Amino acid sequence: MANVLVVKAHPLTAENSHTITILDTFLQAHQTEHPEDTIEMLDLYHTPVPEIDGDLLLAWKELSAGKAFTELSDAQQEKIRLFNEFTEQFLASEKIVIANALWNLNIPTKLKAWFDTVNVAGKTFKYTAEGPVGLIHDKKALHIQSSGGVYHGKDFSAEYVKGILNFIGITDFSAIYSEGADYTPEKTTEIVGHSQAEARELAKSF
């Protein structure tokens, strides 16, 4: 039995999104293959994720200087509480599924804000004399991404997601890159269908 955290970084549903079509296919197959797993959906477009801003930066600085949490402003306390909740939610999950589309060669801003909550010194990585070292070795991750063009998984978004997860220690990493649906629209059904088949196969061992 495992806790599966699904990070949905797309505002649309499967009706209008290739990314979510593939995600839904994977989740249906995964539930069939691993009925004992618990799936928790984190919809970043319907969940407030605090961005690192002035409130958070000053709050962390003040806490490091010895200020009590209760002495922070209400806004600072709430943002830290939410930030920490996302960190703990990530730490409590054994399997991570991230789904997003490639927009302007990068990840959605809401996904970047979420990644900031799981890339935390002292919790998911630590600094050493030899440099930073990842602390997360008990999780596996899957990245599902669709893109209109063809990049062979070498675009900034794909590289960023894999790079950050590797940075914090996750090396059991899989990816489904559904590429070229806009470049060759006459092959859209074939491209998405191939990615769905890949998702069903991957669900067996994930």
Image (tube, grey):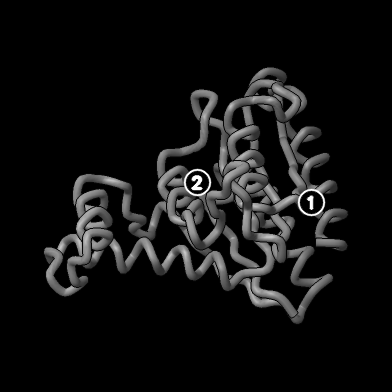
Residue 123, compared with residue 17, is above or below; it is below
> Relative to residue 131, is residue 172 drawn left or right?
right
Q: Residue at x 32, y 54 (%)?
A: 50
Q: The C terminus is located in which quarter? A: bottom right
Q: Nearer the viewer, residue 4 or 178?
A: 4
Residue underneath mark 2 = 10
Q: Residue at x 45, y 52 (%)?
A: 114
Residue 159, compared with residue 45, is above or below; it is above
> Relative to residue 205, is residue 52 drawn left or right?
left
- At label 1, the amino acid type is Ala
Q: Secondary structure at mark 2?
A: loop
Q: Residue at x 20, y 46 (%)?
A: 54
- Disc 2 to disc 1, C-alpha distance: 18 Å
Residue 98 is labelled as none
Q: Nearer the viewer, residue 129 or 124?
A: 129
Q: Secondary structure at mark 1?
A: helix
Q: Residue at x 67, y 18 (%)?
A: 183
> Residue 36 at what x, y percent from top left?
75, 81
> Residue 128 at what x, y percent from top left?
57, 49
Residue underneath mark 1 = 199
